[in-house]
Every structure is written in C-alpha cells, then in structure tokens.
Amino acid sequence: MKLINCYVSSFGKLKDFSYDFSQGLNTIMQDNGWGKSTLATFIKAMFYGLNSSKKSVAENERIKYRPWNSTQKFGGYVEFEWGENQYKIERFFGLKESEDTVRLFDLKTGKEHSNTDNLGKRIFEIDEEGFFSTTYFSQKDFEIKSNSSLTAKFNSVCDVQDTEVFDKAVERLENKAKTYKYRGDKGLIPDLKREIADIDYELERANKSTQALANLKDEIAQLESLEKDLSSKINQKTKEISVAGEAQANAIKHQQYKDLLAQKNQIQADIDEVEFVLNGNKTSKQEIDNYITCHNDLLIAKNNQQILKGDIEKLNQNKEASKTEEKPKNNKALMYISVLLSVFTLVGYIINVFAGIVLTVITIAFDTILYLQKNKKPTKSDFIIQLETLIEEKKKELVKYENLEKEITCLIDGFLSKFNLKNSSDKVSALNQIADLLTEYDRLKKQLSTVNDGLKPLETLNLTISSSSSKNSAVLRQELQVLQEEYSKTANLLAGKKANLTYHENVANAIVDLESKKEELTQKLNDFIYKHKILTLTNEYLKKADENLKVKYRAPLQESLNKYLSKLDGQFNAKIDIDLNVSVQEKDGDKHTDYYSKGYQNLVEICKRFALTDVLFKKEKPFIILDDPFYNLDDKKIKNALELINELSKDYQIIYFICHQSRRGEYGL
C-alpha cells in the first residue's frame, strides 16, 4: 500500500497545498512552524477522521485544526494504492462530527463507493489507536501498549478468525461484571449492601421507637391534664378582668361626667359675663365696623378744624398787614397767601380726600381772583375786602366741621351707652372690645353645645362603681398573660409530644415490612454475588486463553525487534512480553527500559514499531509516517537510524518529516 498524492483545501495552517508522493522515501524538510505535524495529522484524518472527544484545544483535533475566523468546512483528499487498485478518499469536516462528509472513489472506474464506514480500520485492519502504535511515528507518542486492535491484528496474522467475537465476549463479560461491582463503591452489589444497611438502620430506629412509645404516652397524659387546668384558670381570670374592667370603665365615665359638668358651668359663667356687657343688644360686627369708620371721620373733622383755624389766623394777620401797605405790596402779599393756602390745602388732601377737594376748589378760586386783580389793578380797599370774604368762608367751613364733630360724637356715645362697659372713654378700644365679645360669645356657645353633646350619653348611664375586686385590670391582665404563656408552652410541648408519638408509631409499625424487605434483599444480594463470581471467573479464563493465543506471535515479534535494535546499537538482546513490555538482558539480570535514558527508550520504541509493522502486515506493506522521531538520539544513533530508514524504504513507502539538515545524514534522505 502506498500514497499517490494529497491535496489540502484548508486544514490548520495549510491551505491550497498539494504534494505528490513517490515510491520509497519521501523526505519533507521545513522549518519549525511550517505545518509538518499538521500534514501528518491530515493524512491520518483522511483515513480515520478527527478525534474531537477531548475538551482542551491541544488534544481536540477538530478545534486545533479548524481554520481561524471561519465557519466553512475544512479538509481535502488523499489518493492511494491499495492492493491492485487505486482510490481517492475525500473528507471535509464541520463544527461537529454530524456535519462531516466522506467519499470514496475508485480511480480506475470513477465509481463512488457507498460504504464509507470505518475506512481506516477496513484498510489497515487496525483502528486509530493501533495506527498510532504502528505506522505513525510522532514526537510525543513513542510508547506502545497492547490494545484490542493490535490483538485482533495479531490474531488475524495467526489465522485466528474469531478475534472480534472474542473481544466482544470479553467486553460483554467485563461490562456485565461491572454492573454488579465496579471499582470503588459502584454497582448492583454495593447498592444492595447500602440498601440493606439502610434497612438495618431503620430497624434499629423502629426498635428504639417501640421502647419510646410507653414513656411518650405517660408524658402526653400529664401534659393534657396540665393544659386543661391552665385553660380553666384562664377562663376564670378572663371573667375577673371583665368585671374589673367594667368597674374601672364606670369610674372613668363618672370622672368624665364631673369634668364635663364643671367645664359646662365655667363656660356658662363666661357666657353670662359676656351677655352682661352686651346688655341684650343684638349688634353685629358690620355695625361696629361702621361706628369705627364714623370715629375715623370724627378724627378727620377735628384735623380739618385745626387746619382751618390756622388758615383763618394767617388770613387775619395778612389783613392787618395789608392796611398799612401799598397796592403793589398788597398784590404781592396776596400771592404769598395764595401759595401758603395751596400748601395747607395739599396737607388737608392727605388727611381727608373730601376736605382736601373742598380746599383745593377754594384755592383755585382764590388764585383766579389774584389773576383778575393783576389785570384789573384793584385798589387797596378791594384787597382787604377779598381777605375778609375769604376769612368768612373759612369760618363757615370751621363751623361745619365743628357741627360734624358734635354729631359723630353724640352718635358713638349713644351706641356705647347701650353696653355695660367699665370704661368707654377710648371709643375705638370700646368698639373693638364689643367686637371681640361678639366673637367670644359665638365661640362659647359652640363650646357649650359640644360639652352638652358629651354630657347627654353620660347622664343616661348608671355610673355605679363596683368594689367587688381588690385588683385593677392591669394587674389581672399581667396574671392572665403569665397563664397564657404557660398554656402556650404546654400546648406546644404537647403538640410536639403527640407528633413524636405519631412518628414513633409509624416507625414501629414498619418493623414487619422492614424485616421482610431485608430478607428479600439479602437473598438478592447473595444471588448477585454468585453471578458476579461466575462472570469474573469466566472472564479470567477467557483472558488466560487470550494470553495463550498471544504467545504465538511473541517469538516472531521479539526476533524482529532484536534485528532492528542490533542495526541501531550493535549487539542488543531484548525481550518482549505479550503486553508489549520490553526488557533488556544485562549481565546482572533483565532490566526494564525505564532504567535507561530517554534516548535509549525512544530507540526501543522505534524498533518496536518497525517490528510490529513487520509482523502485523504480511499481505500488504503499509506506508510509514515519521514525524521527526529521532530528536532524542545522539549522533551515532541518528546515523544508524538513518541507515535503517534507508534500508526500510526498499520495502516500505516512508514519509519522513524533518526540520534540520542533520536529520538527512550522509545518505541525503
């Protein structure tokens, strides 16, 4: 069997890459990181697919070799020669195994084969694990251990045809035995033992519950008696509280009645005092406000009188002065008087709008006279006459305000005389006092109505105070609370005891069922133990027979192993057992390869692979993939290894991946 060519559409870092393989040795030398291991994995994947069972990126091939930043399928094809025919395997991989596609073509006929299941195992007659143990040499996986795939291949070489049946029989025996008892504490037998142990625990609890039932019944009887006694005391104490509470309530209501009655009397006294001052007069707040307004008018009248008196006095002074002055001076004096009167008129306007208006009219008239006098050129006697006329008008106005003052004073005094006021000299204070009394009178009337409403229900009650109990309700309630707390504790304790009684009764009643179930499980356990023993013995006998079968291929494998070891390291005598463990014969005895250096261990594993390939593949030699497996060997062993590869390439197609020229050797591999 040999590879013809391959094409990588996309796989890891390789993309749109193709390679044609030749017969014998194919050396692919590239720098580290180029993708040599990727190409080796690609060739394996074309036959066996991708291993995606691992979670880590380093071990999960589907994740590791899927191109970055792409969700498209990746893969390619390999063309190879098998027997006398040539074939093409085309595989593409998706995000998961169900998305993978595989196709197999016959290159001679162009026909596509429908059966593509387990292509690698059908072609090499070993599974993926066996492939990694024989024809695929990687740097990280050197050690070869016996596995079912290699055993099947050995048996086929030894002309044993029922290997698969044997493996399935061993597997079924082992799986069946594991159902009864697996490593640790798993399986039907441990489960039954735990179930029986649980039943023993339940039986122990049931026996203890039977013993506890008698004591619980006595405790429950005592607690029920105590609960009944406390209930009776609580009822009695509740009645005492009711009687004491009623007496205290009557006492409180009686005191409320006395307090309200005293409040009513005080309110009535206040009402009588207000009514005495009001003296039966039905006045109103509006009427009092009107009298206060009249009093303000009185003040204005008095103020205007003062202003008018001042005006008259000044006019008289001007009159006397005018008798001795000349005409021009008279006119000038008259102008001064006019200005002075205008000022007084303005002050009067501020004091009283009405009076101010009157005086303003007079002033305007007086100014008009002055103007006419200027144009008329009046005589000295005419000016004096004008002053006298003005004085007379002022006097008439003064009399008018004096009469108004008397009228308003009489009106207010007449109103205040109707009331029993202690002091009415200050008329405004007296009027405000009457207004306040009216407000107070309304308030007292409403308050009296509220008190009367509170007295009505109390007047109809029989407010007798009972003295039958010497304790007040507060003390009785404290005693009741103590009784209730004691009752609650007793009731809770009783409920717990009853629940415990029910629990122990249920547990105790299960004794018969538990004993019956234990007997049934014990019989079942003995049956399982017997079956497990039979399965274990059967499996041991089958494995013994298998070991006897493996002895047949041990001799040729050991012979081939020593042949390759002697080519790599001169004289070498090694032994290999049926589990593919190798030991080296020394003068002081046989030593396992673990005692040797890493380079020697790699050397032994390389020769073991070559030996396995010789022994396992008799009908058709497979191709061999070497992913730089000699990096741990010294110069001498590398030289010998390269000589060995050169010799093997005569019989095998070898794909040899290296990263350094030194791995080519003198043969230029």
Image: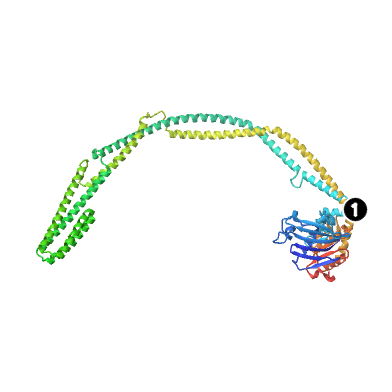
Image quadrant occupied by the N terminus = bottom right
129 or 363: which is nearer to us?
Answer: 363
Q: Residue at x 16, y 65 (%)?
A: 375
Quadrant hosting residue 628: bottom right
Image quadrant occupied by the C terminus = bottom right
Q: Position of residue 87 (x, y in %)?
A: 84, 59
Furthest toward the right, the residue is 159
484 or 242: which is nearer to us?
Answer: 242
Q: Residue at x 46, y 35 (%)?
A: 478
Marker count (numbered):
1
Q: Position of residue 208 (x, y in %)?
A: 66, 34
Residue type indicated by callout 1: Asp
Which residue is labeled 1 in the image?
Answer: 159
Quadrant hosting residue 598: bottom right
Q: Is residue 316 left or right of residue 669?
A: left
How many residues crowd mark 1 within 10 Å: few (<14), some (14–19), many (20+)? few
Q: Position of residue 608 (x, y in %)?
A: 84, 60
